[in-house]
Image (cartoon, rainbow, N blue to C red):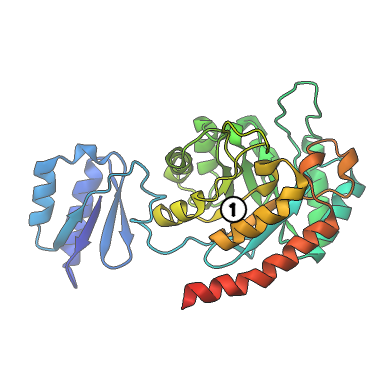
């Protein structure tokens, strides 16, 4: 629900209105353009209460928000959110490249890849320390040692780092990690999402579930934001359909849909979406053209011998080609938007 105020409203009346709404267990957020955004279970405000609000001198009008997500809703937050990752901006017109291997395998491997992707324009290094694998016998990652190797690569290159969390118990290990990734399998792990929401302003990259709708993705973001952390980045990584030619089906239509209904940045993962390295480049370019705020791409210096997802990992030189192509098309896209 949004309450629009009249021009130069009496602040004492606004204060009393806010206090009355708070008593009902609803938070009130000041918004752009003399508006108050009501966040919480607004079903407690019945038609009689709405009529009372409309009758207050300082109130211009009341708009009911039908969508169940509030903090992630563009109606409550008109401008695009920009997530500041230690000086690296995600969203708000920036195009951010995140790159690195599926899994951290060794000090030499992660540092070598980090240096190459940094040279090609990546600002954030990805690398799995804890790996959710379909098979219990597959490589599960290096765990806490993998996080330490990511931190070493960060020191050597200056890249920010992102890695995936699997369980609430792992949270203390992520204190120095710049972005915590929530994988597709954990998108609806609501207890984990709540705990991440309590992590202050720690940026969270939230991946869309394997068969989740756009509204379900936004509701998961709402879980994090409802606990106070509004630094959420949405990530499309392909959804499960009947198609078997690719690992998943990349839903690029989610970009304009999410941009219309939410203010949160949208990152595309063409590696997990396609599962095939040769399709990563065209899907990366298509994502940029569709208005994504960035890409998260798997890069490996020896894909054939990668311990995880080598088939979908591009080599460093190919990542450089993708980055160069992106830099060529972005000015054209941005020029079209500004006209």
Q: How many marks?
A: 1
- Provide the residue designation for mark 1: 267
Kindly identify the residue that appears in the image at 27 percent across and 58 percent down: 36
Badge 1 density bin: few <14, some 14–19, many ≥20, Cα 10 Å:
many
Q: Tell me: 251 left or right of 122.
A: left
Residue occupying image coordinates x 44% and y 52%: 257
Of 256 and 127, nearer the camera is 256
Q: Residue 53: x percent and y percent?
A: 13, 52
Q: Is residue 95 above or below residue 216?
A: below
The picture places residue 277, in percent across and down from the top left corner, at 77, 47
Residue located farthest toward the top when viewing the structure as drawn: 136
- Provide residue 187's location: percent of width, then percent of height: 54, 35
The answer to whether residue 87 shows anywhere in this view is yes
Q: Position of residue 178 (x, y in %)?
A: 66, 52
Q: Nearer the viewer, residue 199 or 90?
A: 90
Task: Answer left or right for 267 relative to 320.
Answer: left
> What kind of element bears circle 1?
strand
Seen at 74% across and 68% down, the residue is: 324
Q: Nearer the viewer, residue 209 or 264?
A: 209
> Can residue 158 be seen in the rendering of this structure?
no
């Amino acid at each position: 629900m949004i309450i629009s105020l009249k021009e130069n409203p009496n602040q004492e009346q606004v204060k009393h209105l806010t206090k009355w709404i708070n008593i009902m267990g609803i938070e009130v957020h000041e918004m752009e353009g003399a508006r108050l955004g009501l966040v919480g279970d607004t079903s407690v405000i019945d038609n009689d209460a709405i009529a009372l609000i409309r009758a207050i001198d300082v109130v211009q009008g009341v708009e009911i928000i039908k969508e169940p997500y509030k903090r992630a809703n563009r109606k409550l937050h008109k401008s695009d959110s920009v997530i500041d990752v230690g000086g690296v901006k995600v969203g708000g017109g920036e195009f951010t490249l995140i790159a690195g291997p599926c899994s951290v395998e060794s000090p030499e491997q992660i540092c070598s890849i980090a240096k190459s992707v940094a040279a090609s324009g990546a600002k954030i290094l990805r690398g799995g320390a804890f790996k959710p694998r379909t098979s219990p016998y597959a490589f599960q990652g290096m765990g806490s040692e993998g996080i330490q190797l990511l931190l070493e690569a960060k020191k050597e290159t200056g890249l920010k780092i992102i890695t995936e969390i699997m369980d609430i118990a792992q949270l203390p290990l992520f204190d120095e990690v710049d972005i915590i990734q929530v994988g597709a399998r954990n998108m609806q792990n609501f207890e984990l999402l709540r705990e991440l929401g309590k992590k202050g302003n720690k940026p969270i990259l939230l991946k869309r579930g394997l068969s989740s709708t756009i509204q379900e993705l936004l509701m998961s973001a709402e879980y994090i934001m409802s606990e106070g952390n509004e630094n959420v980045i949405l990530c499309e990584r392909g959804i499960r359909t009947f198609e078997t030619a690719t690992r998943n089906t990349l839903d690029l239509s989610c970009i304009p849909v999410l941009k219309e209904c939410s203010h949160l940045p949208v990152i595309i993962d063409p590696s997990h979406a396609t599962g095939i390295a040769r399709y990563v480049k065209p899907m990366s370019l298509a994502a940029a053209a569709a208005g994504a705020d960035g890409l998260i791409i798997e890069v490996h210096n020896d894909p054939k011998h990668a311990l995880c997802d080598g088939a979908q990992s591009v080599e460093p030189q190919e990542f450089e080609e993708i980055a160069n192509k992106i830099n060529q098309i972005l000015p054209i896209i941005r020029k079209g938007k500004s006209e």
